[in-house]
Image: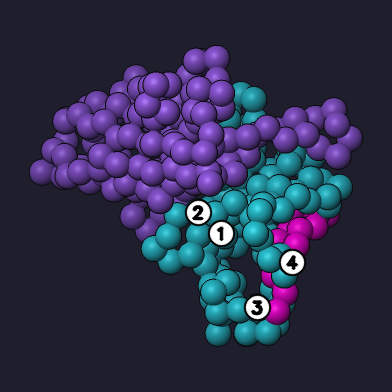
């Protein structure tokens, strides 16, 4: 069974650092794109970061320069290192697996999140 | 970059049908979107991808009551024979090679 389990969420003071983890089972994180999506209390979903199977990484402007996505292939685990945390980083952090699809013509491709973890809560407050 | 617009709320009675809308911004009407369901206190769940042609592909285990359709820049999620467990927030999203994933604001569906 394909599954994602996030851990590591905590209450952290503004300006602090935290690393959250996402353990995958049923598939290999190294062979797939992997992503982080967050949801602030009472708000919608916001894409945070992605790591490609070739190791390239990309970030939303709101976290660029502060967050780092990485993976440990031997542990089949995805990470998000969060530094210089702010109150507006308070959210449930979900890891998700983007997979590639092709449209019905076969010419156009796209990526969509087909598996989601249950999330881990990060609260930034003094 | 694409922007997705969703109505903030919708409601319908058990056993009836409801059609939720996700509208793509100008210049992006041919984009493919995905629909996700988030029941109260739970993680999002992938429902389907939906093309501008109206062709859709559902995720594993998604009931037949869920279907998709399209018209121009609008992408629809129709839920037939509404059940109490369909009460949830529904999000659409789209991918772009420059901006990656963009989510709509979500629609809160109440089953009266």
Categorize mark 4 by other alpha carbons within 10 Å: few (<14), some (14-19), many (20+).
few
The part of the image, by quadrant, that contains residue B6 is bottom right
Quadrant of the snapshot with the C terminus of chain B? bottom right
Residue that badge 3 annotates: B82
The front one of A67 and A79 is A79
Tag 3 subunit: B
> Does the image show residue A88?
no
The front one of A11 and A26 is A26
Q: What element carries label 4?
A: loop
Mark 2 and mark 4 lie on one chain; the one further toward the N terminus is: 2
Q: What element carries label 1?
A: strand
Categorize mark 2 by other alpha carbons within 10 Å: few (<14), some (14-19), many (20+).
many
Categorize mark 1 by other alpha carbons within 10 Å: few (<14), some (14-19), many (20+).
many
Chain ID for purple: A
Q: What element carries label 2?
A: loop
Chain ID for cyan: B
Q: Which label lies toward us, 4 or 3?
A: 4
Mark 4 and mark 1 lie on one chain; the one further toward the N terminus is: 1
Mark 1 and mark 3 lie on one chain; the one further toward the N terminus is: 1
Q: What element carries label 3?
A: loop
For marks 4 and 1, give the CA distance: 15 Å
For marks 2 and 4, give the CA distance: 19 Å
In the image: residue B100, left or right of residue A109? left
Q: Do the residues indicated by labels 4 and 1 lie within the same chain of the protein?
A: yes
Residue B44's tag is: 2
Q: Residue at the spot x=71%, y=53% of the render?
A: B58
Tag 2 subunit: B
> Does the image show residue A116?
yes
The part of the image, by quadrant, that contains residue A37 is top left
Residue B64's tag is: 4
The front one of A29 and A18 is A29
Q: Give the range drawn in magenta.
A: B67-81
């Amino acid at each position: 069974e394909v599954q994602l389990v996030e851990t590591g969420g905590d209450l952290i003071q503004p300006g602090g650092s935290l690393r959250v983890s996402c353990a995958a089972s049923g598939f290999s994180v190294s062979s797939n794109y992997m992503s982080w999506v967050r949801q602030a209390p009472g708000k919608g979903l916001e894409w945070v970061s992605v790591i490609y199977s070739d190791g390239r990484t990309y970030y939303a402007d709101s976290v660029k320069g502060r967050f780092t996505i990485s993976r440990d292939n031997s542990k089949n685990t995805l990470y998000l290192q969060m530094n210089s945390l702010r109150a507006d980083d308070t959210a449930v952090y979900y890891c998700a697996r983007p997979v590639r699809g092709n449209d019905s013509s076969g010419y156009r491709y796209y990526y969509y999140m087909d598996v989601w973890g249950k999330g881990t809560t990060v609260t930034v407050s003094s | 970059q694409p922007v997705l617009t969703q109505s903030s709320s919708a409601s319908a009675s058990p056993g009836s049908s409801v059609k939720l809308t996700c509208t793509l911004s100008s210049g992006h009407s041919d984009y493919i979107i995905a629909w996700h369901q988030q029941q109260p206190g739970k993680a999002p769940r992938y429902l389907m991808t939906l093309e501008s042609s109206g062709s859709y592909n559902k995720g594993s285990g998604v009931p037949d009551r869920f279907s998709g359709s399209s018209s121009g820049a609008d992408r629809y999620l129709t839920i037939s024979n509404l059940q109490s467990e369909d009460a949830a927030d529904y999000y659409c999203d789209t991918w772009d090679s420059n901006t990656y994933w963009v989510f709509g604001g979500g629609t809160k569906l109440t089953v009266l």
